Image (spheres, coloured by chain):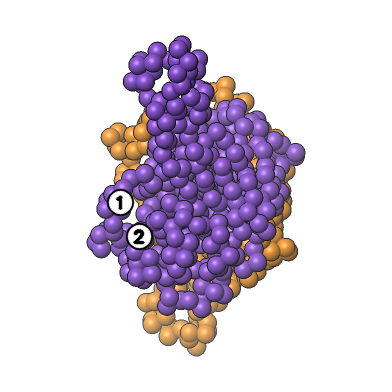
Chain colours: A purple, B orange
Amino acid sequence: MGLKITILGNNSARPLLQRHPAAQVVYCNDEPFLIDCGEGTQVQMLRYRVKSWRINHIFISHLHGDHYLGLMGLLDTYALSDRQHPLHIYAPAPLQTIIQAHLSAVIPDATYPYPLIFHPTDNTEKKLLYEGNHLSIYSVPLVHNKIHCTGFVFEEKKAARKMRKDKIEEYQIPFILIDGIKKGNHFELPDGKIIPNEELTTDSRIPQKYAYCSDTAYTESLLPYLQNVDLLYHESTYLNDKIQQAQQRGHSTAEQAATIAQKANVKRLLLGHYSTSYYDLLPFLTEARPAFAQTYLSQEGATYDISQADWSEHEIKTEYFQPQCSKQD
Amino acid sequence: MGLKITILGNNSARPLLQRHPAAQVVYCNDEPFLIDCGEGTQVQMLRYRVKSWRINHIFISHLHGDHYLGLMGLLDTYALSDRQHPLHIYAPAPLQTIIQAHLSAVIPDATYPYPLIFHPTDNTEKKLLYEGNHLSIYSVPLVHNKIHCTGFVFEEKKAARKMRKDKIEEYQIPFILIDGIKKGNHFELPDGKIIPNEELTTDSRIPQKYAYCSDTAYTESLLPYLQNVDLLYHESTYLNDKIQQAQQRGHSTAEQAATIAQKANVKRLLLGHYSTSYYDLLPFLTEARPAFAQTYLSQEGATYDISQADWSEHEIKTEYFQPQCSKQD
């Protein structure tokens, strides 16, 4: 269990043949949550076997086209597939106008046949967007050239303690009491003796945290939100050779992303949102790792399992990471 | 020379892994014109080597998402690539609202850095949209469930007659007179003898016509616009097994498309806009050809040269035309 992230697209601005715009799926207990939805995302979901019909919550960081232009096609496909269950979208307010303009283009005041619940995001402070039994999801303000832009932080809730099956048998514990014991109760034997909870249960694992920060300039205002997260996805649109451009355009370099990761004491860092001006992406790793050793380059199609101790499969082999697109792309 | 058509996408409604939504490029004297722009079109243009920066005119038939959702990404890419020269868009009027909503989503009242000239289409009668030195392009009304929808007809202009080089030498014709002779003038020798134009020039080839009709129900109101066109692209969303569905949804079957082609006396018919409910597309050909022998199935990535007499390369081999997407797609 735990959180897993599948990357559907991690390219910046315009797409290339093998490099798609921003989109990723965060799985919590196998429930998928979609972050960003660049053009082509629904095809990427087919390609990487994402059960798109199980997505009930979509989070859009900001309204640059490379982060949302795949959304209307996905909403249309849901309608064509007779979706009935509600879909929640968390995004800057103008997206609601855009969706309505798309719907009304053929039929005035049209609506989707399924409930579409829009939640405008707030880019001024950390806000709770979603609360479920296992997970809370927050928006956090990013700094992207004064554009309304938020990151997202996924925080698992601590699961109930686990009942020891051998103790059920040993003490003949009635089924009806098990739920209370998982929540912390002791158990009283018929003769009055109290069996403490610590003997009857084991602790659940430590809840995991995942943070998505794209797009953003380097900003230490993020640090309080990112403390000790298990995995941070931080945009690294440029290398230090284009640090001026990064600053002007509200983006970060690989080294800057790694610096944030180091200062926030995260466990691992995933880089992404690569500029198309870079043909070879390996330099992102070589730039970032001196600042933060547990840096990985996000790869389209890969799934990152936070619970997995060994991430050697995600190490980049040089010959792999020259993208298949030709230079003129 | 002549007209050539490259298919970028010919799938209906939702995309599949190897089947992209509507888009095609019509080349006239190597100048590309884009018809429809479904999601993913700019990547398809990379894939099939379309020089997208040379496109100055984009024609959108109607505002179902599978025909236009790739447009905003393309307009954004033009801006990022520092496009300076004007771009003309011919489309139903609400598209202008959609484009503006997209632009204004991050910066109120933003505009593109290049001139974007919007021409709202008229779906009530045949209208001239574009007139150049070599080509006229018209919109024609389609019948698609009362939705504003137009097809497009490309009509080459008759080129000037060709000057015979041997005659220039034989009669020592001054260069300054050649243009006039190509337009029909005779040539007077110093001794007063008149050399007739028919001796000095050869006729240019017959101008070609291409018609794009998607999306549309079967309608004989199209016939006057399609008479004798060299190539007709007519949607065939369904086979006759779903003829009721075709009628309800404002679409055509393969046989209906072929019937239109036969009644309009076109030279060749290309089918496209296939429903995702069909895994194997060969039945579209077997249904259409009894009604119109010169029917071909449009294939994504293929280029159709109207001037080419032999189209055997476009014949479908059975093993090819089972699309690579899996059935659950």
- The answer to whether one can see residue A289 in this image is yes
Residue that mark 1 sits on = A311
| x then y, percent, for residue B48 | 39, 56
Label 2: which secondary element? loop
Residue found at x 39% / y 42%: A48
Q: Give the residue type at disc 2.
A: Gln
Quadrant of the snapshot with the C terminus of chain A: bottom left
Query: Is residue A305 rendered to the left or right of residue B35?
Result: left
Which residue has dot 2 on it? A294
Answer with the quarter of the image where residue A143 lies: bottom right
Question: In front here: B71 or B214?
Answer: B71
The mark that comes first in sequence, 2 or 1, is 2
Horizontal side of B139 relative to A216 (left or right) equals right
- What is the distance, in whole Å, between disc 2 and disc 1 at their CAs? 10 Å
Q: Residue A32 location in percent, x, y? A: 48, 38
Give me the residue at 48% from left, 24% from top. A186
Residue A122 vertical position relative to residue A82 in the rendered view, above or below:
below
Please report the residue visible at 29 percent of the width from the left and 59 percent of the height from the top.
A316
In the displayed structure image, the side of residue A27 where residue B248 appears, left or right? right
Q: Residue furthest bottom?
A: B190
Q: Residue at x 45, y 31 (%)?
A: A161
Q: Crowdedness of circle 2 by 10 Å Cα count: few (<14), some, many (20+)?
A: some
Most extreme residue toward the right is A109
Amino acid residing under circle 1: Trp
In the figure, B210 relative to A182: above or below? below
How far from the left and from the top, in percent, is residue A116? 65, 36
